[in-house]
Structures are given as C-alpha cells and as structure tokens.
Image (tube, grey):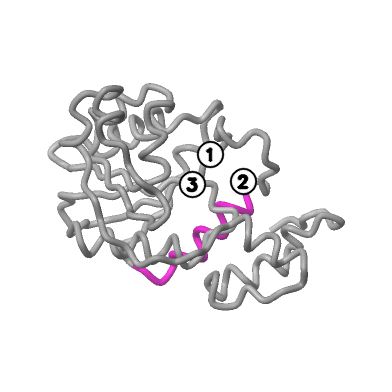
Amino acid sequence: MTLRRVGILGGTFDPPHMGHLILAEEARDQLALDRVIFVPAGDPPHKRDRRLSPVRHRVTMVSLAIADNPAFYLSRVDVDRPGPHYTVDMVRLLREQYPPPVELYFLMGFDSLADLPNWHQAAELIAMCQLVALTRFNVRIDWHYLEKQLPGIRQRVRILDMPELELASHVIQQRVREGRTIRYQVPPAVEAYIYKHNLYMDNVTPSDP
C-alpha cells in the first residue's frame, strides 16, 4: 500500500486506554490517515518526577491494545534509543522512515498545544509535520500568544472535534490500587495484562512478561 498520510500518537501509555484508541481512530477517519503510529515514550523529560512502569510492559500493552486495528502500528523508535527523549527527535526519526511525499500528522491534546512554546525545539517540530489538536472542553487556546511565540503556527494546526472522554492513565492506575473496576476503560487484553503482571500495585513488584 502506498502511504500518503501517517498519524503519530506519542505518550507514556501507562496504561493505554480506550480514550487513546478512540482519539486515534477519530483522527484516522477525519483526516483520511493511512496509518496511525503509536509511539511509547522512553524517558520523557517532562515526566521524570513520575514513576513509570518498565518500558517492556508499556510496549506490550500498546501492542495488545492495537492488535485488532490493521491501521494502527507500534513503533519502538523512542524506546530503543538513549534519552532524553524529546518529541522533536522522535518525529525526526519517523520522518526518516516516512520521507516526503508522505505527510506526517502529529496528534496532540489542546493542553499540549497550549504548552507548545515550552517544548524542546518546538519550531523544528512544527516544520516537520502538521499538528493535529484534539479539543478538550476545559482547555482554551490563546492563539495570539502562540502566534507570538511560534510565528505561523496557526496555519500548521488542524483542529479535530473529538468525543469528550474523561479517561486518564493516572486515574486508571489509582483505580487498580483501590481494587476498583477498570473494565471498559482499557481493552480487555490490557486489563488482563495489568492484573497478570501486578502493575500499579505499590506493594508488589511487577512481574516479567
């Protein structure tokens, strides 16, 4: 298949949940993407104050979560290289794998878009791909500020109207610790994997895959 449009969805995916999958599928549908690449983060600089599950678990959970969608792909481009892991470096590596005329679309939330001026080499990121911002009801974008910090950004952003789902990985982790259900919040295979390997239980060491 000749690829024309490829979406990129990065994240820690700790764990991947139904919100991630709905987001990716909506982007695929609305933008006519040929492929959406899920890129688990290796060592995200902005989350060094947060304890992450081992990479092997996060990668396996993503693989399980996307297994039934032929348009979804897993990339290890971020986890198989030394850190720190900045988004711009990850996109640069994917651009080498998917050179022009393939168009790259980087999927991000409104909260990330609002914070974009603080990202490492944000201007280079914008030059390499089209940004796709996913609406959130509780986040407003100050376009005047963004344009002042990153001239021309407005022309590089596509806005998608997405279903509002209040799902967050850290909340799912907490529900596991409290013994509450996470059914229908993560794919069944991911739910089974979490319990099989004792993920998110503070008093239990995660087991090997």
- 2 or 3: mark nearer the eye: 3
Asked if disc 2 and disc 3 are in contact, CB closer than 8 Å, the reply is no
Cα distance in 3D space between marks 2 and 1: 7 Å
Label 2 sits on residue: 55
Q: Earlier in the sequence, mark 2 or mark 3?
A: 3
* Residue 207, horizontal then vertical, whole percent: 77, 57
Instruction: Name the side, left or right, on which 56 lies relative to 89.
Output: right
Disc 3 is placed on an element classified as: strand
Amino acid type of the residue tagged 2 in the rendering: Val
Local packing at callout 2 (Cα closer than 10 Å; few below 14, some 14-19, many 20+) is some
Local packing at callout 3 (Cα closer than 10 Å; few below 14, some 14-19, many 20+) is some
Residue at horizontal 27 percent and vertical 24 percent from the top: 150
Instruction: Name the side, left or right, on which 172 lies relative to 135.
Output: right
Cα distance in 3D space between marks 2 and 3: 12 Å
Where residue 164 sits, quadrant-wise, is bottom left
Label 3 sits on residue: 11
Label 1 sits on residue: 79
Up/down of 54 relative to 155, above or below: below
Stretch of the chain drawn in magenta: 55-69
- Chief secondary structure of the magenta portion: helix
- 1 or 3: mark nearer the eye: 3
Residue at horizontal 18 percent and vertical 51 percent from the top: 3
Amino acid type of the residue tagged 1 in the rendering: Val
Q: Which mark is residue 203?
A: none
Locate the N terminus and report the quarter of the image it occupies: bottom left
Up/down of 149 relative to 157, above or below: above
Q: Is residue 64 magenta?
A: yes
Where residue 135 sits, quadrant-wise, is bottom left
Asked if disc 2 and disc 1 are in contact, CB closer than 8 Å, the reply is yes
